[in-house]
């Protein structure tokens, strides 16, 4: 299908409700204070639904429901939980197109990405943790012939999860799948910019979950997110978003000594050594695609390769080819399957990106392509579009150091291995990085030397469920994905048992 119909129109694969309340205790309930907010699509800026505006009162009701459900859910067998997660995945697979179109309409990203990446990856995440929880084992240590230490994995209880607007369904899956697998009840707050697609998903799977195991409170950060993160009634807070907000989440959770996992911002270096251009072949083509990955999801990715470091020996040729590849990007209607870059998620984000385009030029960075708002007109008039932009400059500039979260890459050159690593690590962040080289030794040494939680080597923007993801420095605490995620949603119970009838002999 070259172009999907707008949701709610004739032949549309999905429709939104005119209003979404909070999902609490297995049912939709209106907000206590009776307030709602409008939710526009970034595609044309027009409101398509309204969302309950949650407050502390709604959070408390959700926590009541979660606490009522948590004991029974925590006692279900891993096999039961695995079956449920696989059923969720099946429902998603059966409704992949509807979810993909809903996500694009809510977020503005191209449907080709939601069809090929966002929704399939979310499905795989539920399947992965269905398998992982069944394979998880405790341990037994025989300290001596009469003394044994048993170690059991137990759920934390009720956990708070706050997800961002750049990958609404996928980020929900990243958090929900391990938390549910581990036996926790959840209160989830979606981002206020993109709250609708999660409710489309909920409509598909809600009957599978016992009431109260999953609760969704919509709303703004200060009004709903803060009371959730600062509540003494949650056992853990998981947050994905920008670093400034992450500091606040950590502060809120610390009031009651609650553990947190934080997946925060990044300013990821993407390093291209000279040997990348040694031959005009498939690998060079792959590397040029890797360069252009800064525009994936309109650059609204915490690990966006937003700093390209190109070795001087091939700099001129490679950057020229990179500009050409970037100018081949197709910007258009996000529901058109030929579109490769869609709309930014909100008008606020659009304005932020445009301000950085001005900042870069004021600092003396040179625009090699792009550099302005994209005026697409027609039925896209009023949408939030930015031209994919390449800046050329120096690493001390703000466009190199600050997270723009748009389709903007800042490019500079380096002389040798040591200078590449020095520039790569000259940042507050350490979430992701890319290394491109034909030399295996260089690839290994660079990957180990870069201060980042994930280093893509001769690839970029792969997100398999079984590869750990998370940051160094100010890019976060803890990890997402991989079986280690279960540890973030469980606590260890140790039974230290003596089978000897003899006293220790101290008293």
Image (spheres, grey):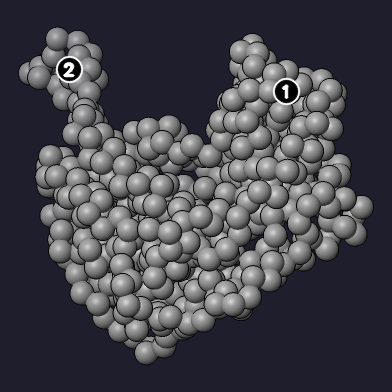
Q: Nearer the viewer, residue 17 or 154?
A: 17
In the figure, is residue 382 to the left or right of 419? left
Rendering quarter of residue 72:
bottom left
For residue 318, above or below residue 71: above
Farthest residue to the left: give it.
501
Q: Nearer the viewer, residue 382 or 263?
A: 382
Residue 4 at x, y percent in the picture? 40, 65
Which secondary structure, mark 1? helix
Looking at the rendered image, the disc whose residue lies closer to the viewer, 1 or 2, is 1
* Separation (CA) of disc 1 from disc 2: 63 Å
Residue 260 at x, y percent in the picture? 46, 49
Q: Residue at x 34, y 33 (%)?
A: 483
In the figure, is residue 458 to the left or right of 41? right
How many numbered badges does the structure rendering display?
Answer: 2
For residue 493, above or below residue 215: above
For residue 20, above or below residue 186: below
Q: Would you say residue 275 is visible in this rendering?
A: no
Q: Nearer the viewer, residue 167 or 2?
A: 2
Q: Residue at x 70, y 60 (%)?
A: 387
In the figure, is residue 456 to the left or right of 204? right
Q: Which residue is mark 1?
A: 277
Q: Residue at x 26, y 61 (%)?
A: 214
The numbered dot on residue 121 is none
Q: Which residue is mark 2?
A: 147
Q: Would you say residue 372 is visible in this rendering?
A: yes
Q: Nearer the viewer, residue 398 or 282?
A: 282
| Badge 2 density bin: few <14, some 14–19, many ≥20, Cα 10 Å | some
Residue 233 at x, y percent in the picture? 34, 62
Q: Residue at x 19, y 45 (%)?
A: 86
Q: Earlier in the sequence, mark 1 or mark 2?
A: 2
Q: Quadrant of the N terminus?
A: bottom left
């Amino acid at each position: 299908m070259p172009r999907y119909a707008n949701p709610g129109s004739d032949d549309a694969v999905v429709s939104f409700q005119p209003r979404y309340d909070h999902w609490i205790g297995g049912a939709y309930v209106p907000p206590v204070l009776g307030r709602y907010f409008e939710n526009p699509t970034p595609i044309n800026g027009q409101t398509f639904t309204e969302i309950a505006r949650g407050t502390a009162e709604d959070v408390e009701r959700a926590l009541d429901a979660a606490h009522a459900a948590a004991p029974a859910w925590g006692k279900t067998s891993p096999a039961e939980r695995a079956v449920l997660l696989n059923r969720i995945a099946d429902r998603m697979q059966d409704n992949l197109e509807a979810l993909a179109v809903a996500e694009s309409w809510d977020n503005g990203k191209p449907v080709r990405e939601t069809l090929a990446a966002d929704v399939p990856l979310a499905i795989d995440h539920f399947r992965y943790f269905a398998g992982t929880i069944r394979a998880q084992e405790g341990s037994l240590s025989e300290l001596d012939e009469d003394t044994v230490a048993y170690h059991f994995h137990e759920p934390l209880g009720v956990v708070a999860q706050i997800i961002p607007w750049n990958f609404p369904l996928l980020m929900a899956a990243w958090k929900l799948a391990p938390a549910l697998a581990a036996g926790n009840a959840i209160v989830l707050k979606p981002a206020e910019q993109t709250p609708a697609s999660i409710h489309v998903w909920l409509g598909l799977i809600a009957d599978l979950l016992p009431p109260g195991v999953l609760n969704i409170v919509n709303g703004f950060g200060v009004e709903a997110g803060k009371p959730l993160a600062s509540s003494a009634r949650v056992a853990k807070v998981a947050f994905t978003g920008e670093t400034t907000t992450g500091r606040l989440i950590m502060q809120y959770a610390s009031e009651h000594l609650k553990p947190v996992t934080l997946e925060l911002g990044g300013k990821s270096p993407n390093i291209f050594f000279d040997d990348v251009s040694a031959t005009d072949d498939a690998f060079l083509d792959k590397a040029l695609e890797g360069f252009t990955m800064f525009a994936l999801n309109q650059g609204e990715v915490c690990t966006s390769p937003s700093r390209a470091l190109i070795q001087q020996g091939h700099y001129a040729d490679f950057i020229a080819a990179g500009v050409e590849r970037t100018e081949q990007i197709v910007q258009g209607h996000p529901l058109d399957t030929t579109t490769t870059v869609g709309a930014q998620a909100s008008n606020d984000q659009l304005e932020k990106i445009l301000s950085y385009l001005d900042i870069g030029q004021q600092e003396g960075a040179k625009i090699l392509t792009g550099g302005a708002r994209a005026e697409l007109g027609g039925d896209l008039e009023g949408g939030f579009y930015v031209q994919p932009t390449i800046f050329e400059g120096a690493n001390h500039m703000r466009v190199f150091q600050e997270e723009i979260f748009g389709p903007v890459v800042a490019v500079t050159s380096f002389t040798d291995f040591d200078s590449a690593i020095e520039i790569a690590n000259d940042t507050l962040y350490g979430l992701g990085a890319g290394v491109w080289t034909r030399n295996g030794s260089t690839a290994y040494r660079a990957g180990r030397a870069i201060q980042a939680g994930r280093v893509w080597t001769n690839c970029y923007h792969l997100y398999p469920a079984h590869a750990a993801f998370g940051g160094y420095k100010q890019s976060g605490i803890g990890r997402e994905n991989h079986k280690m995620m279960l540890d973030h949603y469980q606590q260890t119970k140790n039974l230290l048992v003596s089978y000897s009838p003899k006293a220790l002999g101290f008293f």
